Amino acid sequence: MKNTISAFVLGLFLVLSVDVLAQGPQFPIVKGFGGIFEIPEATERPDPKLEYKILVDLSTGAEDNKAISRWVDNVARMMNLHGLAGVPQENIKVKVVVHGGAIFTLLNDENYKERFEVDNPNLKVYEALKAAGADIMVCGQSMRARNLEVSDLWPGIRVAHSALTTITTYVPQGYVLLKF
């Protein structure tokens, strides 16, 4: 009897474990980054019929410069969360303005390696974000304050006059501001 109960409990554990593992992270919009999970019991979800205009104020530096910044990955997560809820990719308008300590996540591999002794792990995330339609900008004021040139950075960016003026330009146009 004891062995039967133990076998049942072990079997149940294995079935539940396989079920949880089968529901691994999903990447509906930003491929390979920002993995998210379906939450079937969620009653509060994005409305797939709405257009989402989101401006991400990305200023927090990476906690570990040898790994992908959780803040850069969080932009991918945010886009994927909307996609998993059924919002079509064309209805998700995302602009990211990078400044402050986060500016180093935009260094090209040569400059990143010189500073942190590894290739920039964030560039693949930025590439995937751009492929998913995100517009990535860097604050020109932050560049100058850190003696950086456009050639020091990932070539997929646009240079903004400043993060401050980018925010004051897009918020009145209906963009929701998220601070990372």
Image (spheres, rainbow, N blue to C red):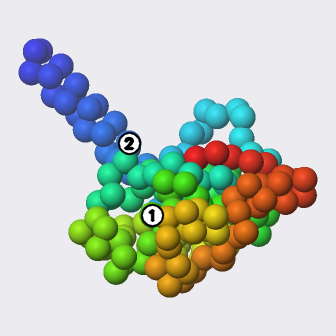
* Distance CA(mark 1)–CA(mark 2): 36 Å
The label shown at residue 104 is 1
Relative height, residue 115 to residue 102 (above, below) = below
Relative height, residue 124 to residue 51 (above, below) = below
User: Residues at badges 1 and 2 in contact (C-beta under 8 Å)?
Assistant: no
Residue 29 coordinates in the image, percent (x, y): 60, 65
Residue 11 coordinates in the image, percent (x, y): 23, 34
Report whether 111 appears left or right of 39.
Answer: left
Residue 66 coordinates in the image, percent (x, y): 29, 60
The residue lying at 26 percent from left, 32 percent from top is 13
Q: Residue 5 sits in which quadrant?
A: top left
The residue lying at 41 percent from left, 52 percent from top is 62
* Residue most extreme to the left: 3
Considering depth in this image, is 169 or 39 the residue closer to the camera?
169
Considering depth in this image, is 22 or 7 the residue closer to the camera?
22
Residue 179 coordinates in the image, percent (x, y): 64, 45
The residue lying at 74 percent from left, 55 percent from top is 164
Q: Which residue is mark 2?
A: 20
Q: Residue 139 sits in which quadrant?
A: bottom right
Report whether 103 appears left or right of 9.
Answer: right
**Circle 2: residue type:** Val
Of labels 1 and 2, earlier in sequence is 2
Considering depth in this image, is 92 or 10 the residue closer to the camera?
92
Label 2 crowd bin: few (<14), some (14–19), many (20+), radius 10 Å: few
Report whether 135 appears left or right of 151.
Answer: right
The label shown at residue 61 is none
**Circle 1: residue type:** Phe
